[in-house]
Amino acid sequence: MYKILATLFMLLSCQTFSQVQEFKLNNGLKVLVKEDHRAPIAVSMIWYNVGSADEPGGITGVSHAIEHMMFKGTAQYPLGIFSKTIAALGGKENAITNNDYTAYFEKVSANQLATCFALEADRMNNLLLDANEFAKEIKVIQEERRMRTDDNPQALAFERFLATAHLASAYNHPVIGWMNDLQQMQVDDLKQWYQRYYAPNNATLVVVGDVKPEAVFSLAKKYFDALPSKPLPHRESQQEPPALGKKSIIVHGHAQLPLLLIGFTVPSVKTAERPWEPYALELIAGILDAGNGARFTKELIRKNHVAAGADAYYNLYARYQTQFIVYGSPSQNRSNADLEQGFLAQLNQLKTQLVNPRELQRVKNQIIAQKTFEKDSIFGQAMELGLLETTGIGWQHTDKYNDAINKITPEQIKETAQRYFQENNMTEAELKPIIEGKS
C-alpha cells in the first residue's frame, strides 16, 4: 500500500507542475505561469531577490522595513489605496520577508489580474517612502520585535542560537533586525535599499490559477515592460569557515520551561557538493520528528520521558549553508542535560546503525504526501515556484523532489549523519528560566 500511495503522490506532483510556462520581459522581469482551473481565482506574487541575508551591519531589518512601507503609497495610488482596492475586489493581499527574499502577493478573481499588475508595477518603481510615514511605521516594527522576540524567551533563544551558529553567513542576524539598528534606521536607508534592489531584473512574477499563460504574459508586458532595469549589486558567495569546536551559549529569560537547541551546519540544495545530501537530511528530520511514529516521540517522550516536546527542523531550500536543528523542552524533573543526552543518543544511532528500510519508506511516503498536499492549493504552488526561483535553485527543481527523496538509501542516511553530526560542527543554546528572587 505504501508503494502504491508513493507512486500516486509522485504522479500527482508531476501533473501539478508539468504545465509551468516561463517568459521574460525585455527589462529582465521573469514571469512564471501555472494553470489551475479548479476555481475561478488566481494568486499573483512578485518575488524580489533580496532579503535580510543581503543586509550589512547597521541596517539589519531594512528589507522588512521596506515590506511595510510598500503599502504606504505612491503618487498614483496614495496611502491605503492599494489594500482598499484589493479588498474591494474581494481579494486578499500580504507580504513576506525572509533571509533570501521579499515577496508580495494578491489572491483575487482570475479576471482581476490587471488591477494587481497595475498596482505592483507602480510600487515597483514609484514608492514614495515618506519620512513622516516611516517615522510612524518604524515604531510599529520596533513594537513587533518586542512582542515577537524580546518578550518571547523561546524566540529570543532561537535568535541568539542562529547568531552563534553562523559565523560568516548573513543568516546570523534576524529578519526583523536588531533593535539598535531599528532605532537608528533612517528613511534614507530605505530609499537607498529600494533603489538598489527593487527593479524588474531583480524580480520574478509568479501567477497560478484559472489563467492562460499567453494572456498573463501579455498583461505583464502591458504593465511592467516600461519599467527600467537597473545595475544590480554583485552578491558574493558566503561559506562558513571550518568548524573548530562546539559552540555553546546560555540565554536567561522569564520562561516557564527550559529549552534546548542543538544545531549543525549543513548544506542546502543550493550549496551541496553532493546533490543527494539535502534529501538525506530532509529524511533524517522526518525519521526523528514525522508524526507519532517518529523516534523523538517514541523514544524521548513516550518511552524515556526525557522530553515534554522534541522537534527537528531543516530547510533544504536556502541560498547558503543552513542549520539542521533539534530542539525541545525537558519533561518534569528532567534537565536540559538529560535532554541533550537523549538528543545525541538518537543522532548517534543514525551514525552507527542503518535505518530499517521499512521505516525509511514510511517516512518517504509521509514527506511526499505532505509536499503533495501543500501544493494542492494555488498559493502553495505559487510559493514553491517563487521560492525555488528566487533562491537560485530554479523552479524546475520542484519536479525533482519526489525522485530525489525516493532514491535515498539507508547507507546514505548513515553517511550523512556521520559527516555532519559531529561535536566540532555543533552549536548549542540553552534557555534557562529566571527564578524570581534568586541571584
Image (cartoon, rainbow, N blue to C red):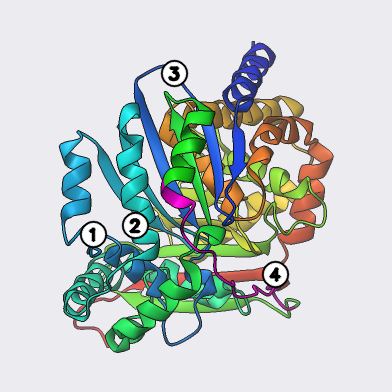
Q: CA distance from mark 1 to mark 2?
A: 8 Å
Q: In this rendering, does residue 315 appear at all?
A: no
Mark 2 vs mark 4, foreground winner is 2
Q: Classify 10 Å Cα crowding around label 3: few (below 14), some (14-19), many (20 and above).
A: some
As drawn, the label of residue 37 is: 3
Task: Identify the residue at horizontal 82%, vertical 52% (top origin).
Answer: 274
Q: Which residue is mark 1?
A: 76
Q: Classify 10 Å Cα crowding around label 1: few (below 14), some (14-19), many (20 and above).
A: few
Question: Mark 1 or mark 4, which has the lower sequence index?
Answer: 1
Q: Nearer the viewer, residue 63 or 60?
A: 63
Badge 1 marks a residue whose secondary structure is loop
Residue 29: image x %, image y %? 55, 52
Amino acid at pointer 3: His
Vertical comparison of 283 with 415: above or below? above
Amino acid at pointer 1: Gln
Q: CA distance from mark 2 to mark 3?
A: 28 Å
Helix, strand or loop for the magenta stretch, by majority = loop
Badge 4 marks a residue whose secondary structure is helix
The N terminus appears in which quarter of the rendering? top right
Q: Which residue is mark 4?
A: 425
